[in-house]
Image (cartoon, rainbow, N blue to C red):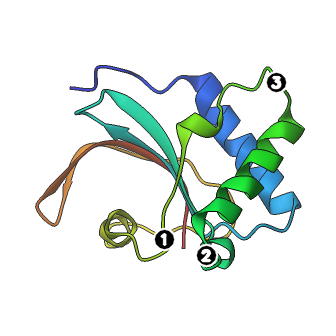
């Protein structure tokens, strides 16, 4: 059972950050909130393939720049974001169950098993 729910405010904030990155021409091929039960923590996991090739610092800088344009009262910070490579095993696992187009979706998997792996909770915005 999920101990910490993902608030509607954070769901909207993740969507707004993704829109801001899209507007800044930062290609995001995967974006999702993932619940880590060991830490009882949610992370917004993003894949920015063009920037990760040049190192994670550049990718995090681009995300921080987008966050700063959204204001100080924004519901998430860089601490809530994790950058992953496009071939990350989590993305590959989730792609066996679903894929999205280039837009922004709200696909929720809660207490599901994919290929024998328990997915406690995830909200997928984009998964190409």
Query: Residue under circle 3?
Result: 72
Q: Is residue 125 left or right of residue 38?
A: right
Q: Is residue 104 left or right of residue 87?
A: right
The quarter in which the N terminus is drawn is top left
Residue toward you, 45 or 108: 45
Asked if disc 2 and disc 1 are in contact, CB closer than 8 Å, the reply is: yes
Crowd class of label 2 (few under 14; some 14 to 19; many from 20; radius 10 Å): some
How far apart, in angstroms, are the residues tagged by discs 3 and 2?
27 Å
How far apart, in angstroms, are the residues tagged by discs 2 and 1?
7 Å
The percent position of residue 69, horizontal first and vertical second, equals 89, 40
Dot 2 falls on a residue whose secondary structure is helix
Looking at the image, tell me whether mark 1 or mark 3 is earlier in sequence order.
3
Query: Residue under circle 2?
Result: 49
Seen at 68% across and 78% down, the residue is 50
Query: Residue under circle 1?
Result: 85
**Is 84 situated above or below 4?**
below
Seen at 60% across and 79% down, the residue is 53
């Amino acid at each position: 059972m999920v101990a910490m729910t993902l608030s509607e405010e954070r769901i909207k904030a993740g969507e707004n950050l993704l829109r801001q990155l899209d507007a800044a021409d930062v290609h995001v091929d995967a974006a999702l909130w993932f619940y880590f039960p060991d830490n009882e923590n949610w992370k917004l996991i993003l894949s920015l393939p063009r920037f990760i090739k040049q190192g994670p610092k550049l990718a995090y800088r681009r995300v921080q720049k987008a966050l700063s344009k959204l204001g100080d009262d924004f519901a998430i910070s860089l601490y809530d974001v994790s950058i992953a490579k496009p071939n990350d095993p989590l993305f590959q696992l989730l792609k066996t169950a679903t894929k999205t187009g280039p837009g922004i979706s709200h696909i929720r998997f809660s207490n599901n098993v994919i290929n024998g792996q328990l997915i406690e909770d995830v909200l997928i915005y984009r998964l190409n």
